[in-house]
């Protein structure tokens, strides 16, 4: 006689081993036989939630609607060093745009791609819409609320027979009085169905039932308010939850609210307050480092990333950011050590080998440079990565004086990504060396329109226009270059010459 395992116990075993679909299937069979089995219903709800769960702690990407139609800002012109929306000068002696490339939002390129670094802050609606829609530029995505709607429709596909729970027929007041069941149901409504209104109703009633003393429900209320864009209400709930119970996640949620309200100093103070209660907590240290990096205070960011590594020496983001900072402060040998550490940890992707290739070249380890780029080529996931690798090989070719190879590499970069502004700029310089002035000018104008935040195309076009006698165009381009990089000495000298020339006329 064969002994079979109890179906509910088997489903629970699958759930613990993260085999969520099998767990859900077994629970469905149990519920067909006994529709009122609360344990199976609860377990299936948890399994479906886990399938589409998104960690709300990360600062999510701001959409075009949140950026351009933001009504929560207090000061239109913030003081320097108090706003994430103003690029701000480098307070911590960080590298200038002449050394470290900038994103559209006016911040140095980070060593690690995070949701908040994918989008920048365009100055005008026109600029936001004109910017190429690629992940490598700072083009804002559609509104965040639209993203959650898309996630919700995706979650419905997991149930071909229709929704597992018909929310319109639920008596939320009844469920809010059952502590364990109500939490499972809230997670399901909030994460799986993305129905923030019903989730908010359930959380409000459950908080009331708990006599406003349950910190967990206050955090959930705060999450609902945050997703609805009611940041001040979210702040009140998170603050109240912290008064009841000190939890790391609550500090992270509250800091996220302050970052969205453009109050980085308050967020920094909050993180430090959290560190008093949880000394050495990696997520809080990382949060401080990220804010310093976004405010262009690179040296402070690096110090905090080093503190992160003291607590967790396998923290990929900290290693990558310190490595990129050493590279851009003219220490490629030290950067190489950090990137090799990532390799030892098992990080194996195109970007890492690309960075290794550049570090080897600038550290004069030429034997390793090409093999690193070959590895990067073998690991590319899309055309944009391929374009970046070819562009960097082109930079190496310029460094060793092989301009024919450089020309071919930049052309290949454009073949894979037609919006690669840096490649257009460098091709223009090479075309000018060959005496093809019109072609060079066309490339520079293309680079200008694709990347208005870069100063190089503006400056090069200004120099070119001045040489061919088009002083008005030269002056306009030089002003754009000055806007993009105010401390650029060559631009200031060029503007001074042009103003003297105009005064003589």
Image (cartoon, rainbow, N blue to C red):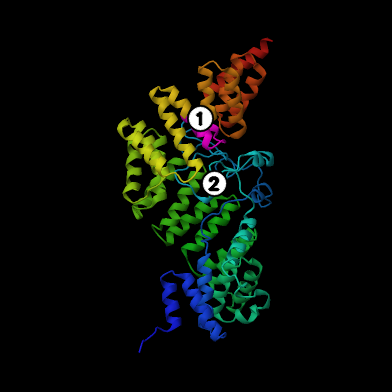
Residue 217's label in the rendered image is: none
Question: Is residue 61 placed above or below 467 in the rendered structure?
Answer: below
Question: Is residue 154 placed above or below 393 in the rendered structure?
Answer: below
Q: How many marks?
A: 2
Q: Position of residue 482 (x, y in %)?
A: 59, 27
Q: Is residue 432 found left or right of 343 in the rendered image?
A: right
Residue 118's label in the rendered image is: 2
Q: Residue shown at 35%/34% (left/top)?
A: 369
Alpha carbon of mark 1 to alpha carbon of mark 2: how far? 26 Å
Q: Position of residue 317 (x, y in %)?
A: 42, 49
Image quarter (top left, top right, bottom left or bottom right) of the C terminus: top right
Q: Which residues are magenta?
A: 409-421
Q: Secondary structure at mark 1?
A: helix
Q: Is residue 70 found left or right of 404 in the rendered image?
A: right
Image quarter (top left, top right, bottom left or bottom right) of the N terminus: bottom left
Q: Residues within 10 Å of mark 1 (few under 14, many from 20)?
A: many
Question: Is residue 436 placed above or below 348 in the rendered structure?
Answer: above
Which residue, as the protein is rendered here, is positioned at the far bottom?
1
Q: Position of residue 164 (x, y in %)?
A: 59, 74
Q: Is residue 311 found left or right of 183 in the rendered image?
A: left
Front residue of 207 and 348: 348
Is 443 colored magenta in this rendering?
Answer: no
Residue 411's label in the rendered image is: 1
Q: CB under 8 Å between callouts 1 and 2?
A: no
């Amino acid at each position: 006689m064969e002994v079979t395992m109890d179906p509910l116990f088997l489903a629970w075993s699958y759930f613990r081993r993260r085999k969520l679909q099998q767990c859900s299937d077994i629970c469905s069979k149990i519920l067909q036989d006994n529709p009122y089995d609360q344990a199976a219903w609860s377990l299936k709800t948890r399994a479906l939630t886990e399938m589409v769960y998104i960690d709300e702690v990360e600062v999510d990407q701001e959409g075009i609607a949140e950026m351009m139609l933001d009504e929560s800002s207090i000061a239109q012109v913030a003081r320097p060093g108090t706003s994430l929306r103003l690029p701000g000068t480098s307070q911590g002696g960080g590298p200038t745009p002449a050394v470290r490339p900038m994103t559209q939002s006016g911040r140095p390129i980070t060593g690690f791609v995070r949701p908040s670094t994918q989008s920048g802050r365009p100055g005008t609606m026109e600029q936001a819409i004109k910017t190429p829609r690629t992940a490598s530029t700072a083009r804002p995505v559609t509104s965040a609320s639209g993203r959650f709607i898309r996630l919700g429709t995706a979650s419905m596909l997991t149930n071909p027979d229709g929704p597992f729970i018909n929310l319109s027929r639920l008596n939320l007041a009844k469920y809010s009085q059952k502590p364990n069941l109500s939490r499972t149901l809230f997670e399901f409504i909030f994460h799986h169905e993305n129905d923030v209104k019903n989730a908010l109703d359930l959380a409000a009633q459950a908080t009331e039932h708990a006599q406003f003393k349950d910190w967990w429900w206050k955090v959930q209320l705060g999450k609902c308010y945050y997703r609805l864009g009611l940041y001040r209400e979210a702040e009140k709930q998170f603050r109240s939850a912290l008064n009841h119970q000190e939890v790391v996640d609550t500090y992270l949620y509250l800091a996220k609210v302050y970052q969205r309200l453009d109050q980085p100093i308050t967020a920094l103070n909050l993180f430090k307050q959290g560190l008093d209660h949880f000394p050495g907590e990696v997520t809080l240290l990382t949060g401080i480092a990220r804010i310093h990096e976004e405010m262009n205070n690179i040296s402070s960011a690096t110090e905090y990333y080093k503190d992160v590594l003291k607590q967790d020496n396998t923290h990929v983001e900290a290693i990558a950011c310190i490595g990129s900072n050493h590279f851009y402060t003219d220490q490629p040998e030290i950067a190489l050590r950090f990137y090799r550490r990532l390799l030892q940890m098992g990080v194996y992707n195109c970007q890492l080998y690309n960075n290794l290739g550049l570090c080897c070249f600038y550290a004069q380890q030429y034997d390793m440079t090409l093999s690193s780029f070959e590895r990067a080529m073998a690991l590319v996931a899309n055309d944009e990565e391929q374009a970046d690798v070819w562009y960097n090989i082109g930079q190496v070719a310029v460094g060793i004086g092989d301009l024919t190879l450089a020309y071919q590499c930049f052309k290949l970069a454009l073949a894979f990504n037609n919006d690669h502004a840096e490649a257009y700029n460098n091709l223009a310089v090479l075309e000018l060396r060959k005496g093809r002035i019109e072609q060079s000018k066309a490339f520079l104008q293309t680079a200008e329109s694709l990347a208005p935040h870069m100063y190089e195309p503006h400056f090069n076009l200004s120099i070119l226009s001045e040489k061919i006698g088009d002083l008005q165009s030269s002056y306009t381009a030089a002003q754009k270059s000055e806007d993009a990089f105010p401390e650029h000495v060559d631009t200031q000298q060029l503007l001074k010459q042009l103003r003297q020339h105009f005064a003589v006329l």
